[in-house]
Amino acid sequence: MKKIFLGLMLSLTLIGCGGSKDSSIIVYTNSGSNGRSEFLKEYAKENGFDVNIVSAGGTEIANRLLAEKNNPIADVVFGLNNMEYEKLKKENILKKFNPSWAAEIPEGLYDKEGYYNAVTLTPLLAVYNPQVISEANAPKDWTDLATNPNFTGKYFMFGLGGGTGKAVMASFVSRYRDPNGKLNISDEGWEMTKKLYTNGYVERGEEDWFGNLMSGKRPILMLWGSGALERQKANNFELGIMRPEIGVPFVVEQIALVNKENNQEQVEKFAEWLGTPEVQTKWAEKFGTAPAHPKALENAPKEVRDLVDSLKIQQLDWKFISENVDSWIEKIELEFIK
């Protein structure tokens, strides 16, 4: 159903392009929810860009780009994460682009070869309802959720088809790296992963997961940082945040150009514009994201800066993860998720 829906969205998008095929910029993104697509389209229009947006989950976007490799439709990819970009880069789907602001982005957040460039930082969290679970009794790590029977059925996890669920899973599984283990993971790692997915509640379709957190039905929730800030504000509801000693995974949303014949000059101008500190600051003010550009982060809302400053970044080997994550997903979905 999701693939059909994405295909329909794409068809409608292309119809919307009409006769302006040469000037319209087609953007594939997994950062289009909660009004982001509409805002970006209008804001880009104000700045002279005719943009059409296809929005779906990160895995769906990456798979569509792979399927369209020999006849690409998208001009720009915005969002995703390093895992997906490494796959696209390996398949020669991206082309190099060196925006003027790239040199100001902290080293380690972008591709040194210039195939993708950092725009926003997104911490991936476990949050909880402090009216149901006190700070003293709250989980301290994903391992607590996996092993403590008090949390059985009490935490919600996104499935592995989207970027958030996949990245959190990878950050957990890769802790148990073992070159002699199955799929490069130790037996202990697979046992802990099994417990994590069988002890919790894994996404089964559309549902009010934040409402379930507020009501106490499932008071612990996997959530991205900007989503936590948005929902706190919208519901006037303070969340507790799990802060593992090892740190929390931060994914970096990037912008990249698709390797195709297109209106190169206009596409590059758009990508250059989207990553500027001014646009990143605007995006942070509107959606609570943490900009990758230091100047934009300085000007971001206080709650965004406070959240980022309060979190330790988990150190991850994204190359190792990218090389193994598909096989991990297959094992988990076949053996652990019922």
Image (spheres, rainbow, N blue to C red):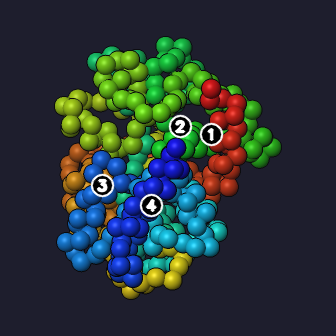
**104 displayed left or right of 321:** left
Question: Which residue does the image show at 50% across and 18% down from the upper left?
Answer: 153
Question: Which residue does the image show at 78% across and 40% down from the upper left?
Answer: 182
Label 4 or label 1, whichever lies nearer to me, is 4
Distance CA(mark 1)–CA(mark 2)? 15 Å
Name the kind of residue labelled 2 in the image: Gly
Callout 1 touching callout 3 (CB < 8 Å)? no
Pointer 2: residues within 10 angstroms few (<14), some, or many (20+)? Answer: many
Name the kind of residue labelled 3 in the image: Arg
Name the kind of residue labelled 4 in the image: Leu
x and y, in percent, of residue 44 in the image:
26, 70
Per the image, the residue denoted by label 2 is 159
Residue 10's tag is 4
Is 104 in front, or is 231? 231
x and y, in percent, of residue 285 in the image:
21, 54
Distance CA(mark 2)–CA(mark 3)? 22 Å
